[in-house]
Amino acid sequence: MTTTRTGTARVRRRPTRSGVVLEPDLIIDAALRLIEAPGGNALTVRRLGVELSADPSAIYRYFRDLDALLIAIADRLIGETLSGFEPGPDWAASLRELGERVHDSMLRHPRLAQLRAVRFTAGPNELRADDLGIGLLRQAGFPAAEAVRHYSDFIDAVLSLAAMDAAELAPSQEQTDKEALAQTYASFSAADYPHLAAVRDHLPQVTSSPFPGVLDKLIYALKGMATAQRS
């Protein structure tokens, strides 16, 4: 992904008022601090200029607009997700680790989770993640078209579940939801909902993250399809 208007090498780098020379990584670092600031996302171009002790317009020498900056941040976080990841001989175990890494990263940066779930960065880190994931499915024995389709389904499911888990609720909202569910589960009529009544004692688990169970099912299904592919 190109994060500057004319390429990093051609951007005229001028010191900020504090004497710091701007560069894309420095801007991304500052933007992340503002996004994750206590009290809510504080990222604006004006505040970014203050954070960097620079004229806000200087940001546009490196990023086309705020959206381009957010996409660059998302690609940076994908790179952090992949840091230290080395696929092993067990493709299924490696794919599981990749999914868990993505989920963990989304939870560490919840205010960017929705963006990461729905946008394609076209950056080097996302391309590397896709290359690794598709490579693991090719290692499992899937032909090209199926490897791409299965990886797309897998990573979209992981991203969607992670975005759900990363959704920020106020403590009062979480408590209200738990109390409402507990009251509902305890009071509904067995005559009206016989199947729910039969599993009433197990219903509280629906408030837990679905991610571990869905990841298990995805890996199980892919292993079964890979076995069938070889037979």
Image (spheres, helix red, strand yellow):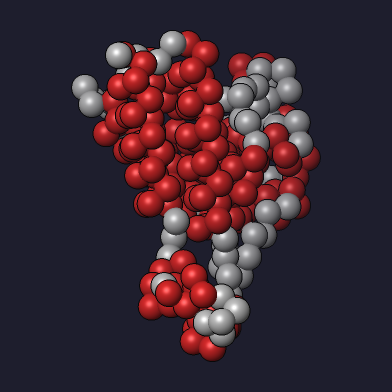
What residue is drawn where x is 53% and y is 32%? 153
Residue 189, can we see it?
A: yes
Q: Residue 75 appears at what percent x and percent y?
A: 54, 33
Where the C terminus falls, by quadrant?
Answer: top left
Q: Residue 170 appears at what percent x and percent y?
A: 58, 75
Residue at the top extreme of this rendering: 143
> Which quadrant of the view contains residue 199?
bottom left
Q: Relative to 74, say whether 205 is above or below.
A: below
Closer to the camera in the image, 103 or 125: 103
User: In the displayed structure, does residue 184 sit left or right of residue 91?
Assistant: right
Q: Residue 37 appears at what percent x and percent y?
A: 57, 62
Q: Relative to 5, say whether 56 is above or below.
A: below
What residue is drawn where x is 34% and y is 20%? 228
Q: Relative to 228, say whether 56 is above or below.
A: below
Closer to the camera in the image, 131 or 10: 131
> Which quadrant of the view contains residue 143?
top left
Q: How many marks?
A: 0
What residue is drawn where x is 35% and y is 44%? 216
What residue is drawn where x is 34% and y is 37%? 220
Q: Residue 49 appears at what percent x and percent y?
A: 70, 49
Residue at the left extreme of this rendering: 89
Residue 28, can we see it?
A: no
Where the N terminus falls, by quadrant?
Answer: top right
Q: Relative to 4, say whether 177 is above or below.
A: below
